[in-house]
Amino acid sequence: MSEEKPMRAWGRRVPALLVALSIAGAGLAWAGCGGDDSTGEAQKRIEKGAEEAKQGIEKGRDEAQKGIEKGKKEAEKGIEEGKAEAQKRIEEAE
C-alpha cells in the first residue's frame, strides 16, 4: 500500500469539511440577522467558528500524519522481524 493514498483521501475530505463549515457559518449568520445581535457580533461568531474549524483541521492533519508515521515504523519493524525469521529458517535448513 502506498503512503500517499491515506493523505490523498484526507486531502479530499478537507475541502468538503470546509464547505460544510462555511454553510453552517452562513446559516448562523443568517439566523443572527434581524435579532438582537448586531452584524458585527454575527461576524465575530463566524470568524471564531472558522478559526475553530481551522484548528480542528490542523489537529486532524497532525494526528493523521502521526498515524502514518506509526504505521510506517510498525511496517519496518515487521519487515526486519520477517528478515530475521527467514534468515533463521535458512540457517536451520542448511
Image (tube, helix red, strand yellow):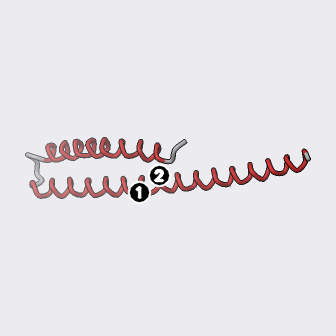
Secondary-structure class at tag 2: helix
Identified at 31% across, 53% down, the residue is: 53
Nearer-the-camera pick, 48 or 38: 48
Write down the quadrant of residue 47 in the picture. bottom left
What type is the residue that disc 2 sits on?
Answer: Ala
Identified at 51% across, 56% down, the residue is: 66
CB under 8 Å between discs 2 and 1: no
What type is the residue that disc 1 sits on?
Answer: Lys
Question: Percent position (x, y) of residue 67?
Answer: 53, 52
Q: Which residue is mark 2?
A: 64
Nearer-the-camera pick, 28 or 80: 80
Nearer-the-camera pick, 48 or 76: 76
65 vs 45, left or right, is: right
Q: CA distance from mark 2 to mark 1?
A: 9 Å
Question: Percent position (x, y) of residue 8?
Answer: 41, 44
Secondary-structure class at tag 1: helix
Q: Which residue is mark 1?
A: 59
**Mark 2 Cα shell of 10 Å, populated few (<14), some (14-19), many (≥20):** some
Write down the quadrant of residue 28 in the picture. top left
Placement of the N terminus among the 4 image quadrants: top right
Numbered disc in front, either 2 or 1: 2
Considering every residue shown, the one lying at the far front of the view is 94
Question: Percent position (x, y) of residue 44?
Answer: 18, 58
